[in-house]
């Protein structure tokens, strides 16, 4: 073999050997990278940015279910980076999804902080690397609560509507049967009118409650003088109070203002006054008192009626709940008045609470955010000075109605 051929052969052998070595190096590097990926707990690129942008609670856990990363909302469930995942069902979900099983589950978790409460959560998991799993927790408590409220509302409304509708049907048949007896016809007609009025009242209140729950904002929000609301309520309920032998007494601070819808506020306060009149004995007083507590206005409606037991106080704001079934049937109560009050007050950023003792009466207190007196309501200095010199009317004195 001549020198040229030997050189070519040597070159070929070198190329083969070099190629083999290069291939071995590439395979070695790929194997190393694959092993690093399989054993690494570092977050894949972009995962941290996604977690920061999420509103839902989300965590990334490793093979030992240690939390390696978490969204801001995860802390609300006590899920902190570096801690072991404590909820057994979440650990089971992680194990299941890593073996190709179910990726979702419904469970109950306790929120930390205030208020600490049980929340219904939809949990989903996905494998994002050989050693890391992403778990997303979506709080569906309010959605489920609203859905349950909707089902209860439909069921209760259907049940309540059946009573007056059935009564009207029976009375119509009775009138037809008693066509030859004018006295009976008149008696049945009176009862039919009462049932029709009850049906109209129930329908109106159902519509009002539905309006309060469905609308996002009040349609006529403005600066509202509390004095104006109380005056309208007293005027509207003067005749029912006189018929029941009940005296309406107004007291407390004047000149306070809130931001809201005067019609909704008047209806809410009117429901409390109507209830107080209905449950008060003849000859008693119903007090409407107003006072300022820090940055809030409190309107208290106090009666000396039959009172409400402590157990029932937890339920009086539920739809269609009646603490005294017999009296409600006699007075035509629908069981929606206090529910309307609650939603109306919540719409205005306030709250309503009740104090009551059986046999001693009840006090329902509405608390609303206070605003400064609007410029349009500020009287000239001379007029205010002249007004301050006038004697205080008897019904403006604090009669203790703000208990």
Image (cartoon, grey):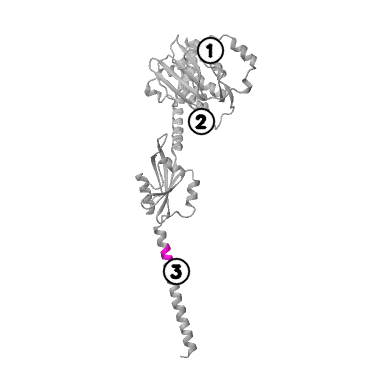
Callout 2: SS:
helix
| Structural crowding at the residue carrying mark 1, measured as other residues with C-alpha within 10 Å and reported as few (<14), some (14–19) or many (≥20) | some
**In this view of the protein, which residue sits in the foreground, 309 or 369?**
369
**In magenta stretch: residue 168:** no
Res 94 visible? yes
Position in image of residue 23 (x %, y %): 44, 72
* Element at label 1: helix
Measured as percent of width and height from the top left, residue 263 is found at 56, 23
Please identify the residue farthest to the left as the structure is shown: 88
What residue is at 45 percent from the left and 23 percent from the top?
353
Q: Could you give the CA–CA distance between mark 3 and mark 1, rounded to whole angstroms?
A: 94 Å
Residue under circle 1? Answer: 396
Q: Nearer the viewer, mark 2 or mark 3?
A: 3
Q: CA distance from mark 1 to mark 2?
A: 35 Å
Q: Quadrant of the C terminus?
A: top left
Residues shaded magenta: 29-33
User: How far apart, in angstroms, are the residues tagged by discs 2 and 3?
Assistant: 66 Å
Instruction: Check whether the beta carbons of the residues at disc 3 and disc 1 lie within 8 A of each other.
Output: no
Instruction: Determine the secondary structure under disc 3.
Output: helix
Q: Is residue 220 above or below residue 61?
A: above
Q: Quadrant of residue 230?
A: top right
Would you say residue 179 is visible in this rendering? no
- Residue 215 is situated, as x and y percent measured from the top left of the image, at 54, 31
On the rendered structure, is 376 left or right of 187?
right
Residue tagged 2:
213
Q: Is residue 301 above or below residue 137?
A: above
Question: Who is closer to the viewer here, 36 or 183?
Answer: 36
Tag 3 residue:
26
Nearer to us of marks 1 and 2 is 1
User: Badge 2, how many Cα within 10 Å: few under 14, some, many 20+?
Assistant: some
């Amino acid at each position: 073999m001549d020198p040229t051929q030997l050189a070519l052969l040597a070159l070929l052998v070198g190329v083969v050997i070099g190629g083999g070595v290069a291939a071995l190096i590439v395979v070695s590097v790929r194997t190393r990278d694959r092993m690093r990926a399989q054993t690494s707990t570092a977050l894949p690129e972009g995962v941290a940015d996604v977690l920061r942008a999420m509103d839902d609670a989300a965590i990334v856990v490793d093979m030992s279910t240690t939390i390696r990363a978490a969204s801001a909302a995860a802390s609300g469930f006590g899920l902190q980076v570096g801690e072991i995942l404590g909820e057994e069902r979440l650990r089971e979900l992680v194990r299941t999804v890593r073996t190709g099983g179910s990726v979702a589950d419904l469970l109950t978790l306790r929120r930390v902080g205030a208020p600490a409460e049980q929340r219904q959560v939809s949990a989903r998991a996905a494998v994002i690397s050989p050693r890391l799993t992403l778990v997303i927790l979506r709080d569906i408590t309010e959605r489920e609560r609203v859905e349950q409220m909707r089902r209860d509302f439909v069921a209760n409304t259907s049940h309540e509507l059946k009573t007056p509708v059935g009564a009207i049907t029976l009375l119509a048949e009775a009138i037809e049967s008693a066509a030859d007896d004018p006295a009976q016809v008149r008696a049945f007609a009176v009862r039919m009118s009462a049932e029709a009025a009850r049906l109209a009242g129930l329908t109106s209140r159902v519509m009002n409650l539905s309006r309060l729950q469905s609308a996002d904002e009040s349609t006529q929000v403005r600066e509202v003088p509390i004095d104006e609301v109380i005056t309208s309520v007293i005027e509207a309920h003067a005749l029912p109070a006189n018929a029941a032998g009940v005296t309406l007494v107004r007291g407390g601070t004047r000149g306070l203002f809130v931001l809201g819808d005067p019609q909704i506020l008047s209806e809410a306060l009117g429901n409390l006054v109507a209830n107080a009149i209905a449950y008060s004995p003849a000859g008693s007083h119903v007090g409407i008192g107003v006072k300022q507590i820090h940055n809030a206005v409190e309107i208290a409606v106090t009666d000396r009626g039959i009172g409400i037991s402590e157990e029932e106080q937890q339920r009086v704001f539920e739809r269609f709940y009646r603490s005294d079934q017999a009296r409600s049937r006699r007075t035509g109560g629908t069981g929606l008045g206090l529910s309307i009050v609650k939603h109306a007050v919540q719409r205005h950023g306030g709250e309503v609470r009740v104090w009551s003792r059986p046999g001693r009466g009840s006090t329902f207190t509405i608390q609303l955010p206070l605003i400064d007196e609007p410029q349009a309501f500020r009287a000239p200095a001379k007029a205010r000075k002249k007004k301050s010199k006038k004697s205080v009317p008897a019904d403006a004195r604090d009669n203790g109605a703000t208990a």
